[in-house]
Amino acid sequence: MAASQQGKLFFSFLRIGLLGFGGGPSMIPLVHQEVVKRHAWLEDEEFADVLAIANTLPGPIATKMPGYIGYRVGGALGCLNAVLAVILPMIVAMILLLGLFSRYRDVAWIHGMSQGMVPVVMVMMAQLAWDFLNKSRLALGWIVSLLMAGVAGGLIYWLGVHPGLVIGALLVAALLPPLTKNKAVEGTAQ
């Protein structure tokens, strides 16, 4: 791929990273503008497919979409290029803001501001937990959802099992064939 195309890819996603305040969902219209309308790297239908698949996979959409689009446009180097371009502004902003916060944390209004963020983050996390519980309830029902939440909470908080191991065990269990169906089939065959 030509260096000029890699440059277009980098500056397109750098622009998205600079202007995408509010995280991944706020970046989606910017990605659409750059990728579909400005450069025609994807058609509208292809963009919708990329968006749908990116929403189903784990991780931030702000890096999944640039990664795939960068790969599609410029191969492995394009993938790295697009992801780096979109996260670079976030990394620089975090370093600068956390550096300022660390330096001036003893100033009364900054200390108050940091303490004021705790309840807001708590409410955001509670909303996220409620949304997950509601999705689980719709898919599995209240009893199974609460039972799984209780078992997972017990393993993680009381026994100290790493959350990744709990999630991994659930994924493996979901891939195993159900035992009750196999036994029922064997019983009728005899």
Image: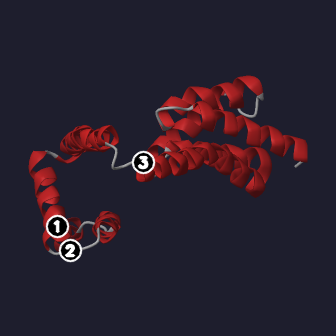
Q: CA distance from mark 3 to mark 2?
A: 32 Å
Verify CB contact (< 8 Å) between mark 3 and mark 1. Answer: no
Residue 70 lies, in percent from the top left, at 71, 46
Residue 33 lies, in percent from the top left, at 66, 25
Can the viewer see residue 48?
yes
Residue 22 lies, in percent from the top left, at 46, 33
Location of mark 2 (residue): 160
CA neighbours of label 2 inside 10 A, class few (<14), some (14 to 19), many (20+)? few
Residue drawn at x 21%, y 42% is: 126
| Viewer-closest of 158 and 14 | 14
Location of mark 1 (residue): 157
Label annotation for residue 45: none
Q: CA distance from mark 3 to mark 1?
A: 31 Å
Secondary structure under the numbered disc 2 in the rendered image: loop
CA neighbours of label 3 inside 10 A, class few (<14), some (14 to 19), many (20+)? some
Residue drawn at x 70%, y 52% is: 79
Verify CB contact (< 8 Å) between mark 2 and mark 1. Answer: yes
Q: Is residue 9 above or below residue 161?
A: above
Location of mark 3 (residue): 101
Amino acid at circle 1: Tyr
Amino acid at circle 3: Phe
Taking the image as shown, residue 18 lies to the left or right of residue 55, namely right
**Quarter containing the C terminus:** bottom left
N-terminal-most mark, 3 or 2 = 3
